[in-house]
Image (cartoon, rainbow, N blue to C red):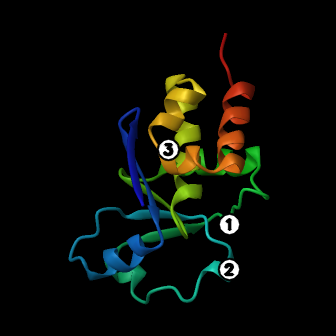
Amino acid sequence: MRLQLECRGVSLLACDSAWLDQAMTQEAPESKLVVDLRKVNEIAALPEGLKEKGIQRVSLPVTAASWSEQDMDMLRREFLRGPSPVVVMSKGGTRAALMVLQHVARVEQWSADSALAKCPEVAAQPELKKLLQDYLQRHLRS
């Protein structure tokens, strides 16, 4: 899965874990910063040579059950700190898509329905859909 959105001049890519393996085969990987949302038990092994490829991997293990506002704050800091594009990666890509959607929808003031329309995979998972809706409701600007 892959979701690409832009927010205030920063390109954000939500991808599944295959992105990292593909990046290792490219002469110039499409991103130099990967925020990895996978828990330790979801990672068989990390590819060797990340540093040689110039890829910085930031580990931010998050599941729907463990998600917190602090996780979002850490992720948003990486978006501001890292070079564009920034890849957010989870095992299947839907958690990554949720996190990217939450950030962009909050900044751009999208409704939950507008955000969910951008990614049917998140909309199809009730737990992720509720996380997005609740997050946007809490951060609604009046």
Q: Give the residue at x 59% y 82%.
A: 43
Percent across and percent down for residue 120 are 49, 45
Can you give x and y, in whole percent of width and height, for residue 99 in the image? 58, 48
Q: Is residue 138 above or below residue 34?
A: above
Pointer 2 with pointer 1, Cβ within 8 A: yes
**For the residue carrying disc 1, how many other residues have a C-alpha within 10 Å: few (<14), some (14-19), or many (20+)?**
some
Mark found first going from the N terminus, 2 or 3: 2
Instruction: Measure the alpha-carbon separation of dots 2 and 1.
Output: 8 Å
Residue type at tag 2: Val
Dot 3: few (<14), some (14–19), or many (≥20) neighbours within 10 Å?
few
Quarter where residue 118 is shown: top left
Residue under numbered circle 1: 61
Residue type marked 3: Leu
- Mark 1 and mark 3 lie on one chain; the one further toward the N terminus is 1
Which disc number belongs to residue 30?
none
Position of residue 110 measured from the top left corner of the image (x, y, whole percent): 52, 24
Q: Is residue 62 above or below residue 24?
A: above
Q: What is the quadrant of the N terminus in the image?
A: bottom left
Is 130 in front, or is 21? 130
Q: In the rendered structure, find residue 80 and report the number of the disc placed on it.
A: 3
Label 1, secondary structure: give it. loop
In what quadrant of the picture does the C terminus appear?
top right
Q: Are marks 1 and 3 in contact (CB under 8 Å)?
A: no
Extreme residue in the top direction: 142
Three-letter amino acid code at the position of disc 1: Pro
Q: In the image, 48: left or right of 26?
A: right
In the image, is residue 26 above or below residue 134?
below
Residue 140, horizontal then vertical, whole percent = 67, 20
Q: Point out the tag, 2 or 1, that comes first from the N-terminus.
A: 2
**Residue ID for mark 2:** 40
**Secondary structure beneath disc 2?**
helix
State how far apart marks 1 and 3 are (Cα).
Answer: 19 Å
